[in-house]
Amino acid sequence: MSLELDISLVEVAASLVLVALAVALSFVRRVELERDLGIAVVRSFVQLTAVGYVIQAIFDSDSLWLVALLLAVMVGFGAFTARGRARGVPGALPVLFVALAGAAVVTLGLVLALQIFEPTPRYLVPVGGMVIGNAMTAAAVSLNRLGDEMRGQAPEIEATLALGATARQAAAGLVRRSLRSGLIPLVDSTKTTGVVFFPGTMVGMLVAGADPLDAVRLQLILLWTLLGSVALSAVVATTLGYRRFFTESHQLRELPSEG
Amino acid sequence: MGVSAARGGRTVLRDVDLVIELGSTALLGPSGAGKSTLLRLLNRLAEPESGMVRFRGEDVRKLDVLDLRRQACLVPQLPALLAASVTDNVRHGPRLAGRRPDVARFLELAGLARSYAGRDARRLSVGEQQRVMLARALALEPRVLLLDEPTSALDEDTSAGIERTLWDLQERLEVSTVMVTHDRGLAARLSTRVVQVRDGRVHTAGAPVS
């Protein structure tokens, strides 16, 4: 699969016209997102350019250690970012860290063991990035819901504990709901893929001149891989996350006010 | 013995020494006095900052906490039922312990007709829900019922009905009760022993005031 594609900065700059359109619409309709749009454009340019050089360097070095380091950095950033949404869960950071790292290691391990991809930076870096990114979103959404549910349902949970239920039994229903809410976005988008929207990898390959059926096959592999990794990440996050609300003696901890 | 406890970062019980005997005891006091915390220490839903809580002579920390909560079962102040039928709610506690209760009997003890069994528990009135809460606690066949303000959320008539049911229970079952209330009259009518709790301290312990 070797594709030739040459994109100049002029073409990249030309696409800013559409950003200008968004800024103009924001201004006219007083959405007040002009500043955020500007920040988004600058950040995406700086971050993607930087990571482009990093990936180039990793490809050139052909070192799996550097791949592992890059993915570890992504897991760290991902956990920090997701914590912002999981503030309702006490001590969410280590939980997110384990969830993201676990999802990345197991998913990439399986993908390599099944010989779907070769163990080279060219595959591991982009696939690992997608896996970690999607795992982050799923874990963040699950823990966000878990925090809300634990606060909203505290009287019911304590009433169940009072009947001699373990923490696990008392939290089972809301852990299940939190898990579902983390998984549903990807499950839904996988259901509608190809009909309502074209996923990024496929678009990229088609634009780069690949055979459409090759593009579809790679896209399928990625989507299905992501389903597995997202499920893993959300399960680990909720399984470790709910325990943060209880003591060893099956008591509901007093929750600090959210923030 | 010498129990202190905090809630929300505030000390609510200070160095409390109290022996609760078999029979019916009321913990009487104004809201915020630490009564509910005292109740939650008894079934170990809360942990004291210092001191020791004993149940039947044993340090509660040495008991199986799940078993303790089945023997000293709490009925919270507000109904907190599962979104399921009344029967499922009554079965819930015993099922966790691997038992199958006689639902009709416990509904009857809690003052509910058999016809309630299949109804959606969360669609009942607050008073009826409180009775389902009582039935599901009774279904565990506890030695002690811990009642947290059992009538405070109810109107006068409903409250009087629940009071009658609690009175009947004490007559019919060999179950001790520890009831938290701010209602002096209720404490006197339902309890043989009234303990006053004020500002986190136990003030007097003795026979009912009336």
Image (spheres, coloured by chain):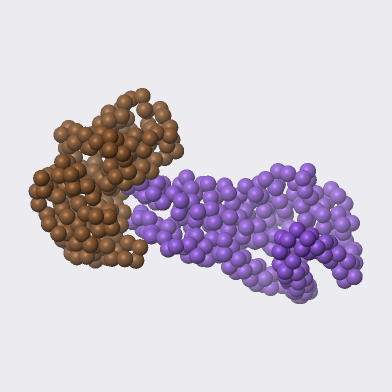
Chain colours: A purple, B brown
> Is A167 placed left or right of A192 in the picture?
left
Q: Which one is in front, A168 or B10?
A: B10
Q: Point out the image quarter for the C terminus of chain B.
A: top left
Name the spot of residue A1 as percent of width and height, x first.
Answer: 85, 58
Name the spot of residue A187 as percent of width and height, x first.
Answer: 66, 46
**Which of the 4 image quarters holds residue B61?**
bottom left
Tell me which residue sits at (23%, 62%) in the image.
B199
Q: In this view, does A132 lie above or below B120?
A: below
> Is A187 placed left or right of B87 in the picture?
right
Q: Point out the image quarter for the N terminus of chain B.
A: bottom left
Q: Which one is in front, A28 or A53?
A: A28
**Which of the 4 image quarters holds residue A249?**
bottom left
> Is B126 placed left or right of B39 in the picture?
right
Tell me which residue sits at (31%, 40%) in the image.
B154
Name the spot of residue B168 as percent of width and height, x first.
Answer: 19, 33
Tell me which residue sits at (50%, 65%) in the image.
A259
Q: From where the camera sits, is residue A150 visible?
A: yes
> Is A30 placed left or right of A154 in the picture?
right
Tell me which residue sits at (18%, 48%) in the image.
B184
**Which of the 4 image quarters holds residue B188?**
top left
Q: Report how many numbered discs are placed on residues in the image.
A: 0
Name the spot of residue A165 as percent of width and height, x first.
Answer: 36, 46
Q: Is residue B174 above or below residue A60?
A: above
Q: Which one is in front, A60 or B158?
A: B158
Q: Which one is in front, B108 or A180?
A: B108
Q: From where the camera sits, is residue A106 visible?
A: no
